[in-house]
Amino acid sequence: MSCADWVEDYLRHMDLTVEAPSVEYLSKICTRHLATFPFENISKLLYYRDLDKTGFLAPPPQLFVENYEGYQFGGTCFTLNGNLNRLLTALGFNCHFVMLSGEHMANVVRFGESVCYYVDCGAAAPFFTPVRLGTLPQIVQFGTDKIIIEPVDVDKHEYQYRRFTGDEQNGKTWTFLASKRCTWEDFKSILEAAHQPGTTFMSILRCQLWQPGRKRSVSLVDHTFTIRYQNGQTQRYELTSMDDIKRVLADEFGLPKLPVEEAVHVLEQLGVDIFRVH
């Protein structure tokens, strides 16, 4: 598959076509990326299983597109934001990786010398539009889920990322340097560490997808299925069988091709029971 082919296919899956780089086009890409490619570790577990055969833990863009077509794979931050970076670069955007607190991969897109945006489609967070980085805090919100990105040191282009559920902070405070152009190689050791047994996405089953047309997001964590609405309403269901999980992924997520049973088998080999009582 040539570069032009994978770019066009990548865009086609998002119902987009090639346009000149602009903030408006970048916003369309962010919205459609979140609504198309799930944040999930099903593919991660299978890439881990097949590492000796393939030699990679995160797929290159050609394979990312092919595996979405064949299996509806999305990924976690390294796969989603890594391939988003390659897409944006191929489309002519001035885009580079940023590293958040040695854990998370995201992107910064620049327009001219002084205008830059934080772009993140790999955090299971509602970044439907790029976030303008400047001197003021920026808030991204969907229902009770809120992310605040604010400057720590404007002169050093240093920012912090905090996530809240309601009024309670959810997770760590991440910091990043927007001006530091990280490369894929800079994330190699972090990527390998994130695939060690017992780490977060090697010890649970996870799938999340934004459905902005329905003003909701759907989430699966092990055997718990949750629907979160933009108005703050939440519905939660405990699933009791693999058939239930496959039905929910097909009917609620629209992802019937995801090979979830294979991923659960990998978790079982790692000593994880997704139907355990939390």
Image (tube, rainbow, N blue to C red):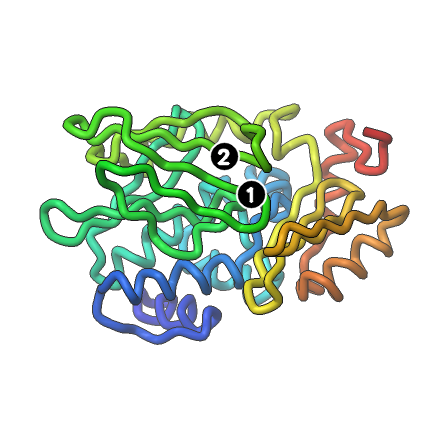
Disc 1 crowd, CA 10 A, few/some/many (<14, 14-19, 20+): many
Q: Is residue 199 above or below residue 94?
A: above
Kind of residue at disc 2? Arg
Q: Identify the image quadrant of the N terminus.
A: bottom left
Alpha carbon distance from label 2 to label 1: 7 Å
**Left or right for 138, reference 156:** right
- Residue 25 sits in which quadrant? bottom left
Question: Residue 248 versus residue 5: which sits nearer the camera?
Answer: 248
Q: Which residue: 73% across, 29% down?
A: 270
Name which residue type carries label 1.
Answer: Asp
Q: SS of the residue at dot 2?
A: strand
| Relative to 146, 97 lies left or right | left
Q: Secondary structure at mark 1?
A: strand
| Quadrant (top left, top right, bottom left, bottom right) of the C terminus | top right
- Residue 145's disc is 1
Crowd tier of the residue under label 2, counting other residues whose Cα lies within 10 Å: few below 14, some 14–19, many 20 or above: many
Residue 71 drawn at (x, y percent): 62, 61
Residue plotted at (65% across, 48% down): 207
Q: How many marks?
A: 2
Residue highlighted by disc 2: 163
Front residue of 214/110: it is 214
C-beta proximity under 8 Å, tags 2 and 1: yes
Query: Residue 175: percent from the left, percent from the top?
Result: 35, 26
Q: What is the quadrant of residue 266 in the picture?
A: top right
Any mark on residue 83, and which?
Answer: none
Q: Answer yes or no: is residue 138 visible.
A: yes
Name the residue rendered at 90%, 46% in the picture: 240
Judge whether 65 appears above or below 272 on screen. below
Q: Nearer the viewer, residue 157 or 58?
A: 157
Q: Residue at x 30, y 30 (%)?
A: 159
Could you say where residue 203 lies in the image, as x and y percent from the top left?
Answer: 69, 31
Name, please, the residue furthest toward the left: 113
